[in-house]
Image (cartoon, helix red, strand yellow):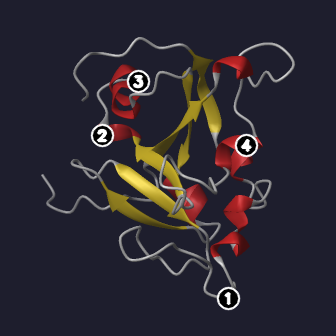
Amino acid sequence: MAQNDEPEADEIVIRGLLRLPDEMSGPFARPHKDKRDFLRREKYLSTGKPENGISVFRKRKFESRQTFYNRIASKKPMGIAECKLGNLTDKGLKYTVSGDKQEHLSLRCPDCNMLEREQGICKPQTGKTFNDCPFFGRDPLGLDGLFEEVEAPAPRTLSKKRQ
């Protein structure tokens, strides 16, 4: 077995599609993958700081979709979209690898300065602020078109043990 566990171009990566309950039906419904699934959040969790990139995961690192949902561990309805990593890097996207099993990839824009959260907030090298990152726009890099929805967002039952 190879010691190198670097992601390869033909490797499938998956993106979690998370929804608020009011996005499942009614006037604000988003029952399927859309461009908003590929935006960098300006205020990430409770940090009040911007998200460093867009998270995707290496599909082969999860035994099943359920294992992936357990890893995300959200109470929100979840689904999955996937594409080949090479389709993303062909657009010039960069990434960092993290996680206990090297399962998480943080996608970065082609001009990203690649700073990590502990060191500072990433931003395009040619930008004045992190807000200049194209991931804050309406999917200008066309990521929505690269990913195929393989499971629509729906309520999930999570295992008590996070895997």
Q: Amino acid at mark 1?
A: Thr
- Marked residue nearer the N-terminal end (4 or 2): 4
Mark number displayed over residue 36: 4
Q: In the image, is residue 49 above or below residue 69?
A: below
- Which three-letter amino acid code belongs to the residue tagged 3? Arg
Label 1, residues with CA under 10 Å away: few <14, some 14-19, many ≥20: few
**Disc 4 residue type (three-letter):** Arg
Whether tag 2 and tag 3 are in contact, CB under 8 A, the answer is: no
Disc 1: which residue? 126
For label 2, the residue is 61
- Distance from disc 4 to disc 1, alpha carbons, whole Å, reads 25 Å
What whole-number distance in Å separates the C-alpha atoms at marks 1 and 3? 39 Å
Query: Which residue type carries mark 2?
Result: Lys
10 Å neighbourhood of mark 4: few (<14), some, or many (≥20)? some
Q: Which mark's residue is nearer the viewer, 3 or 4?
A: 4
At x 75%, y 25%, the residue is 30
Q: CA distance from mark 3 to mark 4?
A: 22 Å
Q: Is residue 97 left or right of residue 17?
A: left
Seen from the viewer's position, the closer of residues 18 and 34 is 18
Number of residues whose C-alpha sits closer than 10 Å to that of mark 3, classed few (under 14), some (14–19) or many (20 or more): some
- Residue extending farthest to the right is 27
Cα distance between the residues tagged 2 and 1 = 35 Å
Nearer to us of marks 4 and 2 is 4
**Which residue corresponds to mark 3?**
65
Instruction: Determine the secondary structure under disc 2.
Output: helix
Location of residue 31 (image quadrant): top right
Q: Residue at x 54, y 13 (%)?
A: 155
Near mark 2 (Cα within 10 A), the count class, few <14, some 14-19 or many ≥20, is some
Q: Given contact means CB atoms under 8 Å apart, are the residues at marks 2 and 1 in contact? A: no
Decide which of tag 2 and tag 1 comes sooner along the chain. Answer: 2
